[in-house]
Image: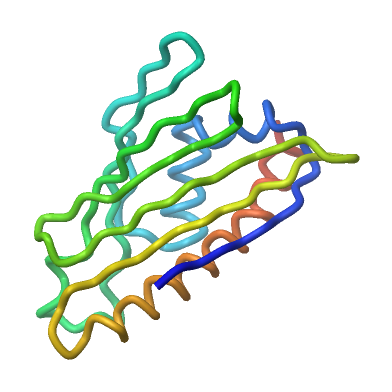
Amino acid sequence: MNLSLRHVLPCSPADYWRCVLDEDYGRTLFVGILGFARYEIRSQVERNGIVGRIIDAEPRREGVPSMLHKLLPYAEVGTLTRARGEYVWHTEHNTDTSRTFGRMRVTACPGGCVREVEMSVHVAVPFLGGMLESRIADDAKRAWDASVAFTQQWLRAA
């Protein structure tokens, strides 16, 4: 299942990336706003304008059948190429049944920046894969949409 999103944010691309790379921003967004059980930047290293990072995250378990709980924790492995304003990522899970790939581009526009996200969700669970893909895509869309207002609040407070 594929998902495409576009949001306009009232900040420069540099300010947006500063937020995204800040662990307090990420933890507050994911745990505080989105209700994740866990969010932690395991590693984040920048060399020559390229930021490589790994994030450990776990969505909340409410509403998910217990037999699927092992699918929830994941690591997001991503690379931000500052010169292109592009972050590319994939997720790694405890099992090989679920994969998410994505690309986020942030470009300047009058009054701020445009964030464009393309992501692909694949779940290989017999009889439930399509339903789970839809749920993950719906949750991702809600999270990306919620991040717009949160980012605005975060930047005002900074």
Q: In the rendered image, which quarter is residue 7 located in?
A: bottom right
Q: In the rendered image, which quarter is residue 129 located in?
A: bottom left
**Quarter of the rendering occupied by the C terminus:** top right
**Quarter of the rendering occupied by the N terminus:** bottom left
Who is closer to the viewer here, 116 or 67?
Answer: 116
Residue 66 position within the rendered picture, expressed as x and y whole percent measured from the top left: 13, 80
Q: How many marks?
A: 0
Residue shown at 45% from the left, 19% from the top? 50
Residue shown at 45% from the left, 58% from the top? 119
Residue shown at 49% from the left, 30% from the top? 21
Who is closer to the viewer here, 140 or 50?
Answer: 50
Residue 136 position within the rendered picture, expressed as x and y whole percent measured from the top left: 37, 71
Residue 145 position within the rendered picture, expressed as x and y whole percent measured from the top left: 62, 63
Give the vertical position of 146 relative to 69 (above or below): above
Residue 63 position within the rendered picture, expressed as x and y whole percent measured from the top left: 30, 83
Residue shown at 60% from the left, 31% from the top? 85
Give the vertical position of 67 relative to 25 (above or below): below
Who is closer to the viewer here, 136 or 88?
Answer: 88
Q: Residue furthest bottom?
A: 127
